[in-house]
Image (cartoon, rainbow, N blue to C red):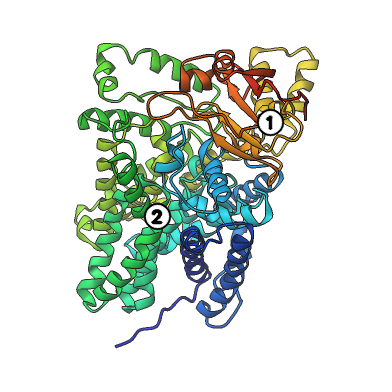
């Protein structure tokens, strides 16, 4: 019996289109590379096909209608939907008016795209920053068509921006299909997106949140396939799960809850196993598998990090260390002035016997709470965690452990098993952010076990939860990454009234640094010789080469990496070398001046640049051949 996909709701139709668009654009670099068209023109065609195909796909999935089925503007009059709407609006406005300045994106995700486009193929780069090779490419593939065709990153925030719009509907669809009461699912579809880690990435180039949509899509289409047996829904579920892993390898354990859901489909409709296997063969191309193969080939380890300190040798230390970091980030307020003091107090105690044993096997164990919720260091936050804890307290009498054995209980238990596996294997201080895709399932399990919709409908819970959630708005509005107010002017104005506190001075520094973070090395670029077209980059892994590609299409930048034997690379063919004092020390164990002497070059100019408020400014030097006529751009 053949079943048709019942994709009638706005969420289902839009998500199906998003999954297919993501798959097409994820496969794009490989196809264009094989065809020899991985260039501006080829990506322009890919961009146009993607946009037009998405419009047509929505029309077909939505039963030949362009209406937004199930969308009601009136629902945003209620407090929780209104709070979500304000967060989404602020995130979109911030993403639209500010150039992207996500630290990881600038350091390795954008540079890897530029290296591929320069070579007109997807390839192993061999950079001094290994993240440019071994990490997942899911987010980058979504960025490439518009970035390559239009020579701008200003549209890249739409990847997370659109995902954030799909988020509430997907939460409701998954929770209500897997045993959470509809009234409770409706409330939490608005509460959960207001978590710090989700809201702060909604207008950024952070790639932790993106996988949430693919994971929820896999579960939504999987649960729909249980009811309908639809071949299309099975295909979309498998494809979405593969895309989730393509974003980050840390998402691989989350295949477990998806597999649990699909096993029910296969038990009920055995013929769909063939559909899943055939789809999986194609889906493997957009998963982490191609990167894993490249990693294994070039490094001997599928992760690309054979000797990484982030791989934990002590599982118990990983459980405790990750547990402490994730729990503390889940209780951290969105506005947290005492964060720095707490971080210093806790981190200073790590050498003590009570915590030293964790640090011995967990090199990156430390607290990194931000004073304002940020895309780099935030987890769930106190708002969402507090709302859940209050709900559990109020519904404590309705706890039923037998619900663990229903489909929802099994699937959401799979999230907890996946988290435990992650915590035992990976030791990264960014764990509260990295596990963003895990949070929906982790929180959904208690919502299944405590079935009391009256608690979440009560005034005391709603008003208390709203009070806990509201601080996310000022954190979003005043975020140094994308402030919606002229914060530098406001801080200077307060200081002009004689309020010269250390806190205001610190705020001024932070906002000024972030204001230049999208193009931090503009002062260095201005010192380049006139007409310099080929540059060698000798910075650290925490310093971005992106600035030196600007304006796009005017020059090429190559990594100045030591040879396999440790010797200096050949500088022939470069018009200049841009080197930081830390970069040459890390790469060659020498200063920029010593590097210039060894190459028989000279330093034409130096300048000091501060890219992070938490660390001192770094000195950058421009090295040129001695025969080069000096000039500044």
Q: Quadrant of residue 213?
A: bottom left
- Image check: 307 left or right of 69? left
Q: In the rendered view, would you say 471 is above or below 294?
A: above
Tally the numbered discs: 2
**Residue tagged 1:** 516
Q: Quadrant of residue 38?
A: bottom right
- Give the x, y percent position of residue 128: 46, 32
Q: Nearer the viewer, residue 256 or 118?
A: 118
Q: Residue farthest to the front?
A: 627
How would you rate the neighbour count of disc 1 (Cα within 10 Å): few for under 14, some for 14-19, many for 20 or more? some
Q: Quadrant of residue 173?
A: bottom left
- Give the x, y percent position of residue 124: 43, 45
Alpha carbon of mark 1 to alpha carbon of mark 2: how far? 32 Å
**Residue tagged 2:** 244
- Image check: 484 left or right of 63? right
Say which residue appears at 67% left-offset and 34% top-offset. 519
Q: Nearer the viewer, residue 633 or 323?
A: 633
Q: Nearer the viewer, residue 599 or 594?
A: 599
Say which residue appears at 29% left-offset and 88% top-offset. 1
What kind of element bears circle 1?
A: loop
Of callouts 1 and 2, which one flags the residue occurring earlier in the amino acid sequence? 2
Tell me if residue 462 can be seen: yes
Tell me if residue 338 can be seen: no
- Give the x, y percent position of residue 541: 49, 29
């Amino acid at each position: 019996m053949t079943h048709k996909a019942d994709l009638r709701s706005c969420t289902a139709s839009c998500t199906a289109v998003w999954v297919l668009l993501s798959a097409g654009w994820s496969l794009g670099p490989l196809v264009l590379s094989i065809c020899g068209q991985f260039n501006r023109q080829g990506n322009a065609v890919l961009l146009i096909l993607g946009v037009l195909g998405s419009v047509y796909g929505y029309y077909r999935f939505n039963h030949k209608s362009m209406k937004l089925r199930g969308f009601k503007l009136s629902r945003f009059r209620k407090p929780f939907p209104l709070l979500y709407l304000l967060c989404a609006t602020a995130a979109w406005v911030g993403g639209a008016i500010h150039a992207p300045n996500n630290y990881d994106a600038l350091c390795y995700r954008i540079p890897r795209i530029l290296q591929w486009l320069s070579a007109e193929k997807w390839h192993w780069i061999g950079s001094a920053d290994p993240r440019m090779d071994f990490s997942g490419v899911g987010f980058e593939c979504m960025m490439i068509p518009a970035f390559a065709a239009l020579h701008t990153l200003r549209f890249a925030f739409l990847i997370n921006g659109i995902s954030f719009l799909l988020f509430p509907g997907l939460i409701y669809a998954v929770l209500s299909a897997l045993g959470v009461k509809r009234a409770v699912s409706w409330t939490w579809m608005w509460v959960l997106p207001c978590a710090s880690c989700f809201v702060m990435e909604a207008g950024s180039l952070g790639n932790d949140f993106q996988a949430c949509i693919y994971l929820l899509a896999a579960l939504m289409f999987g649960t729909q396939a249980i009811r309908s047996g639809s071949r299309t829904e099975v295909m979309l579920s498998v494809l979405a799960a593969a895309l989730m892993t393509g974003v980050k390898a840390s998402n691989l354990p989350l295949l477990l809850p998806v597999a649990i859901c699909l096993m029910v489909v296969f038990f009920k409709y055995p013929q769909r196993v063939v559909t899943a296997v055939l789809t999986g063969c194609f889906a493997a191309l957009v998963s982490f598998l191609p990167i894993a193969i490249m990693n294994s080939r070039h490094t001997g380890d599928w992760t690309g990090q054979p000797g990484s300190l982030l791989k934990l040798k002590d599982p118990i230390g990983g459980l405790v260390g990750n547990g402490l970091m994730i729990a503390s980030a889940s209780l951290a307020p969105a506005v947290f002035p005492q964060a720095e003091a707490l971080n210093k107090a806790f981190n200073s105690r790590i050498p003590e016997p009570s915590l030293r044993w964790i640090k011995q096997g967990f090199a990156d164990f430390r607290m990194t709470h931000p004073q304002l919720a940020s895309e780099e260091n935030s987890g769930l936050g106190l708002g969402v965690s507090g709302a859940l804890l209050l709900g559990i307290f109020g519904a404590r009498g309705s706890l039923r452990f037998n619900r663990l054995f229903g489909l929802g209980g099994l699937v959401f238990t799979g999230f907890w098993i996946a988290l435990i596996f992650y915590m035992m294997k990976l030791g990264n201080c960014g764990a509260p952010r990295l596990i963003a895709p895990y949070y929906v399932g982790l929180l959904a399990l208690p919502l299944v076990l405590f079935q009391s919709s009256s608690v979440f409908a009560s005034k005391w819970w709603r008003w208390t939860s709203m009070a806990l959630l509201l601080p996310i708005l000022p954190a979003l509005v005043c975020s140094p990454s994308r402030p919606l107010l002229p914060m530098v002017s406001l801080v200077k104005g307060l200081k002009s009234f004689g309020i010269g506190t250390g806190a205001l001075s610190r705020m001024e520094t932070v906002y000024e640094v972030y204001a230049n973070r999208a193009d931090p090395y503009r002062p260095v670029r201005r010192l380049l010789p006139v007409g310099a077209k080929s540059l060698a980059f000798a910075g650290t892994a925490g310093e971005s080469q992106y600035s030196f590609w600007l304006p796009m299409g005017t020059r090429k930048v190559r990594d100045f990496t030591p040879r396999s034997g440790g010797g200096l690379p050949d500088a022939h063919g470069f018009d200049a070398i841009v080197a930081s004092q830390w970069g040459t020390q890390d790469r060659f164990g020498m200063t920029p001046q010593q590097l210039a002497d060894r190459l028989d070059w000279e330093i034409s100019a130096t300048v000091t640049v501060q890219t992070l408020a938490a660390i001192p400014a770094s000195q950058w030097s421009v090295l040129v051949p001695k025969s080069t006529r000096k000039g500044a751009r």
